[in-house]
C-alpha cells in the first residue's frame, strides 16, 4: 500500500506541515510553497508532478489537509478530485470530514461546497491582509484615538493627539491609571474607562509600531506619540502596579499597598483618625482583617514612613551594589548586536533584488520577518533595568531628597525600588524590613 501526501502552503499565512503531523506513515510528500501574484492563480508545480506520478505509479491514498488546497476555485478542486478518483487514488482530507473511498464524490462535495467556498473567500481576505502586512500597512478596523488613516500608514491627528500625550505624561508623572483617567475627564472632558486607559498605555500604535491580529509587531512604521524611553517607563510602571492591591496605585499616601504584616502577610491599610471639633488628623496603619483576637494595634503612619526612609537610604545602595551589572551589560550588548545584525541584513535586501538573487515578493516576506524579529528583540531590551540604576541609588540615598518630596512624588519613587515593607512585631515593639524589587 502506497500513501502520499500533498500540501499547499502560503508562507504569508501558515507554515508547511511536518511529516509527523500527517498521522500516517507517508511514502512521499509533495509540497507547494504558494506565491500568489497580483493577477492570475497560484502555481502548483508539485501538484502537477503528483498527478503525473499517479499515472505511472500505483498510489492507494492521498492525504491532504483541506480540499481547497487542490485549487483556487471550486471547479479546479472538483476537476482534480475527479482526476484522482479516475486513477483509483483515494483522497483523505485530514482536517475535513471527507474521504472519497467511503462516500460518493458528488455527495461529499455537495456537503462541503459551502465550507470550501467560505474557506476560499476567507483565504483571499487573509491573503490581502498579509500583503498589507508586508508593506507595513495598518490593519483593518477602527483607528486608535489620536491618529487617522493616511496613505498606507497612521498619521498624527493634531486635534486629538495632544489629549493622548497629556494622558501619558500624567501617568508617567504619578503612576496612577485611575488618576490619569480622572485627569483626562476633568481637563478635556474626554471620558474613557479604566480598561480603555490601560489599552492606551499598552497600545503599540502610540509607540510608533503596528500590531497585527497574529500577534506580530513591526517597529517604527509611523510617527509615535511617546518615545521608546517613555514606553519602557510605562511598562515598568504597569508591572510595578500589578504587584499592588487593587486601587492602591492612586492612593494619596506613599506607603499605601506596600506595608504587610510579617506574620500573616496581610496588607495594612492607611486609616485616618480625627477628634471632634479639631482639625488635626492622625494616620495609622492597621490590618482590617487581622486574624488575631484581639486585633493587632495600629502603628503610627509617620513613624513607619520615617523608618522606611532611613532604611532605604541605608540599604538601597548596598542592594544595588550587589547586582551583577557586568552580566546585565552583557545581555544588553548581546541584544544590541542581534538587532544590529538583523538591521544590516535588512539594508542588503534592495541589492539582492537588483542582482536578481531574490524576487520582490520573497524580499518583502524576508523584510517582514526581519522587522518582526527586530521588534521582539527591542521589546526584550526595553524591559531590562535602566543602566543608570547605580547613580540613581546614590541620589535617593540622601534623606533630604525624600523629605523634600510630596506624598504623591514619594509614592512614585518608593514603588520604583520597594517590593514590600514587612512589619515584624515583637511583644509591644515592632521593626520593619524593606524588601527591594531587585
Image (cartoon, grey):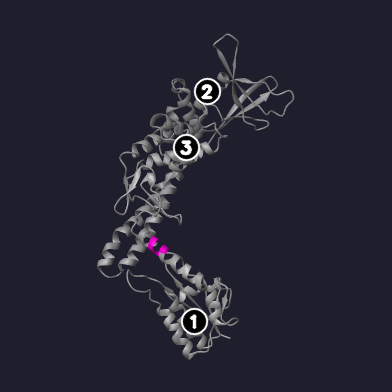
x and y percentages locating residue 378 in the rendered image: 40, 49
What secondary structure characterizes most of the magenta part? helix
- Screen quadrant of the N terminus: bottom right
| Left or right side of 261 for 83 | left
For label 3, the crowd category at 10 Å Cα-Cα, with few meaning under 14, some 14 to 19 and many 20 or more, is: many
x and y percentages locating residue 350 in the rendered image: 27, 62
Q: Secondary structure at mark 1?
A: helix
- Does label 2 or label 1 sit earlier along the sequence? 1
For label 1, the crowd category at 10 Å Cα-Cα, with few meaning under 14, some 14 to 19 and many 20 or more, is: many
Q: Which residue is mark 3?
A: 237
x and y percentages locating residue 330 in the rendered image: 43, 47
Structural distance between the alpha carbons of marks 2 and 1: 81 Å
Q: Secondary structure at mark 2?
A: helix
For label 2, the crowd category at 10 Å Cα-Cα, with few meaning under 14, some 14 to 19 and many 20 or more, is: some
| Left or right side of 98 for 399 | left
Is residue 192 shown in magenta? no
Report the front residue among 105 and 80. Answer: 105
Residue range in magenta is 125-129
Is residue 126 shown in magenta? yes
Q: Nearer the viewer, mark 3 or mark 1?
A: 1
Q: Which residue is mark 2?
A: 310
Report the front residue among 65 and 234. Answer: 65
Structural distance between the alpha carbons of marks 3 and 2: 24 Å
Structural distance between the alpha carbons of marks 3 and 1: 59 Å
Q: Is residue 422 at least partly visible in the picture?
A: yes
The answer to whether residue 286 is above or below residue 100 is: above
Residue at image position (47%, 91%) is 56
Q: Which residue is mark 1?
A: 81
| Left or right side of 420 for 338 | left
x and y percentages locating residue 81 in the rendered image: 49, 81
Amino acid at each position: 500500500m502506497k500513501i502520499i501526501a500533498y500540501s499547499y502552503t502560503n508562507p504569508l499565512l501558515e507554515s508547511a506541515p511536518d511529516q509527523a503531523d500527517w498521522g500516517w506513515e507517508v511514502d512521499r510528500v509533495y509540497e507547494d510553497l504558494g506565491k500568489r501574484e497580483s493577477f492570475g492563480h497560484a502555481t502548483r508545480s508539485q501538484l502537477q508532478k503528483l498527478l503525473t506520478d499517479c499515472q505511472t505509479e500505483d498510489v492507494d491514498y492521498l492525504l491532504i489537509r483541506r480540499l481547497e488546497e487542490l485549487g483556487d476555485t471550486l471547479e479546479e478542486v472538483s476537476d482534480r478530485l475527479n482526476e484522482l478518483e479516475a486513477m483509483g487514488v483515494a483522497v483523505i482530507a485530514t482536517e475535513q470530514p471527507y474521504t472519497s473511498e467511503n462516500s460518493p464524490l458528488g455527495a461529499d462535495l455537495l456537503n462541503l461546497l459551502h465550507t470550501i467556498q467560505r474557506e476560499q473567500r476567507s483565504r483571499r481576505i487573509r491573503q490581502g491582509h498579509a500583503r498589507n502586512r508586508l508593506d507595513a500597512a495598518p490593519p483593518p478596523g477602527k483607528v486608535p484615538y489620536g491618529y487617522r488613516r493616511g496613505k498606507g500608514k497612521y498619521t498624527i491627528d493634531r486635534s486629538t493627539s495632544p489629549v493622548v500625550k497629556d494622558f501619558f505624561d500624567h501617568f508617567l508623572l504619578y503612576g496612577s491609571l485611575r488618576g490619569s483617567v480622572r485627569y483626562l475627564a476633568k481637563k478635556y472632558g474626554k471620558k474613557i474607562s479604566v480598561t480603555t486607559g490601560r489599552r492606551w498605555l499598552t497600545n503599540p500604535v502610540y509607540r510608533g509600531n503596528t500590531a497585527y491580529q497574529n500577534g506580530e509587531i513591526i517597529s517604527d512604521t509611523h510617527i509615535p506619540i511617546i518615545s521608546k524611553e517613555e514606553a519602557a517607563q510605562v511598562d515598568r510602571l504597569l508591572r510595578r502596579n500589578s504587584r499592588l492591591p487593587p486601587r492602591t496605585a492612586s492612593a494619596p499616601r506613599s506607603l499605601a499597598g506596600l506595608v504587610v504584616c510579617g506574620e500573616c502577610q496581610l496588607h495594612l491599610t492607611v486609616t485616618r483618625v480625627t477628634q471632634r471639633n479639631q482639625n488635626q488628623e492622625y494616620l495609622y496603619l492597621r490590618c482590617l482583617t487581622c486574624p488575631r483576637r484581639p486585633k493587632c494595634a495600629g502603628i503610627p503612619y509617620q513613624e513607619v514612613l520615617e523608618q522606611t526612609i532611613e532604611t532605604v537610604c541605608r540599604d538601597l545602595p548596598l542592594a544595588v551594589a550587589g547586582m551583577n551589572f557586568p552580566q546585565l551589560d552583557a545581555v544588553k550588548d548581546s541584544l544590541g548586536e542581534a538587532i544590529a545584525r538583523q538591521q544590516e541584513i535588512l539594508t542588503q535586501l534592495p541589492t539582492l533584488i537588483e542582482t536578481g538573487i531574490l524576487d520582490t515578493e520573497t524580499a518583502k516576506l524576508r523584510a517582514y520577518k526581519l522587522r518582526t524579529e527586530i521588534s521582539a528583540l527591542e521589546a526584550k531590551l526595553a524591559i531590562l533595568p535602566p543602566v543608570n540604576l547605580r547613580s540613581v541609588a546614590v541620589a535617593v540615598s540622601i534623606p533630604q531628597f525624600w523629605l523634600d518630596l510630596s506624598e504623591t512624588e514619594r509614592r512614585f519613587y518608593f514603588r520604583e525600588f520597594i517590593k514590600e515593607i514587612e512589619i515584624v512585631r515583637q511583644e509591644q515593639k515592632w521593626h520593619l524590613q524593606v524588601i527591594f524589587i531587585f
